[in-house]
Image (spheres, rainbow, N blue to C red):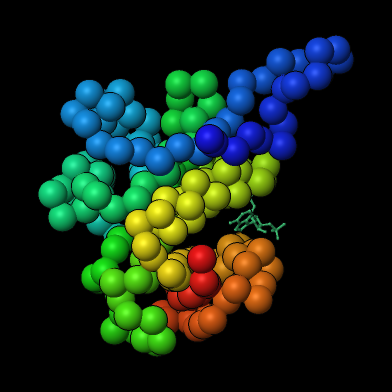
Amino acid sequence: MGAESKGGSSDKGSRRDQPTVRGEVFRYTPEKWDAVKDDITDLARQAQSSGVFRTDDIHEWVDKSFTNPHTIDNTKVLLREGNKVIGFALTQHSYGWSKEANDTVPSDTKAEITATIIDKDHRGNGYVGALMEPLDEDLRNKGFKSVVIRALSHQGYDRAIERHYGEKIVYSSMVTPDFRHIQYNL
Ligand SMILES: CC(C)(COP(=O)(O)OP(=O)(O)OC[C@H]1O[C@@H](n2cnc3c(N)ncnc32)[C@H](O)[C@@H]1OP(=O)(O)O)[C@@H](O)C(=O)NCCC(=O)NCCS
């Protein structure tokens, strides 16, 4: 079940009906991918300008993240408003990051969130929670015990994560001038 937005419409009277915003785990099929790839490419383009990742070829980054055999089973959550994708979060499993962070948990029980992106016109509504709840649940179901978020520190996103996860956090450190790694227990 996806989470509902703070602004979702359940009352019948005064408020304008708004489409429900929901987060859902994306499980790749060619047909499902065809339906979302344009929205996801647009969102990736927005994030490229925020410095979330470095690439000159946005199509290559999107393909590598969503359709590559090495990443296809990694947990991914899409945020939808109606049929439109307005955000997504990506994870990597078991490889790719642990040289920089501590190793208190074996890497096969530790996943990494490599990107969290919400459409610029939809930010500030608490939708990060709608992405993270199904993401954490899917990772728990796969047997993961903890998660590392690679969070951009500008605009205080890293601090917002620290506030939210509080005592579940077991590690937090700036690993580059722009990025903080925060590890929390699931
Ligand atoms: C960073 C970004 C995803 C934040 O989106 P947003 O719509 O502003 O986020 P929200 O409105 O949900 O606000 C963040 C809140 O999420 C909360 N939060 C963090 N993890 C949460 C979780 N698992 N569940 C619920 N809430 C959570 C925080 O408490 C924070 O609230 P606070 O600031 O009031 O303490 C968005 O600005 C964006 O897409 N930026 C460009 C890409 C980027 O920089 N991504 C981050 C690096 S990968």
Q: Considering only vertical position in the picture, is 80 above or below 129?
A: above
Q: Considering only vertical position in the picture, is 73 above or below 159?
A: above
On the image, which quarter does residue 7 sit in?
top right
On the image, which quarter does residue 67 sit in?
top left
Give the residue drawn at x 13%, y 49%: 69
Expressed as whole percent of the image width and height from the top left, the position of residue 43 reads 41, 40
Expressed as whole percent of the image width and height from the top left, the position of residue 126 reads 66, 46
Query: In the picture provided, is 27 more to the left or to the right than 177?
Result: left
Q: Quick check: which quadrant has ligand 1?
A: bottom right
Query: In the picture provided, is 2 more to the left or to the right than 83?
Result: right
Expressed as whole percent of the image width and height from the top left, the position of residue 58 reads 25, 45
Confirm whether residue 134 shows in the render.
yes
Give the residue drawn at x 49%, y 30%: 80
Confirm whether residue 57 shows in the render.
no
Front residue of 4/123: it is 4
Give the residue drawn at x 36%, y 47%: 76
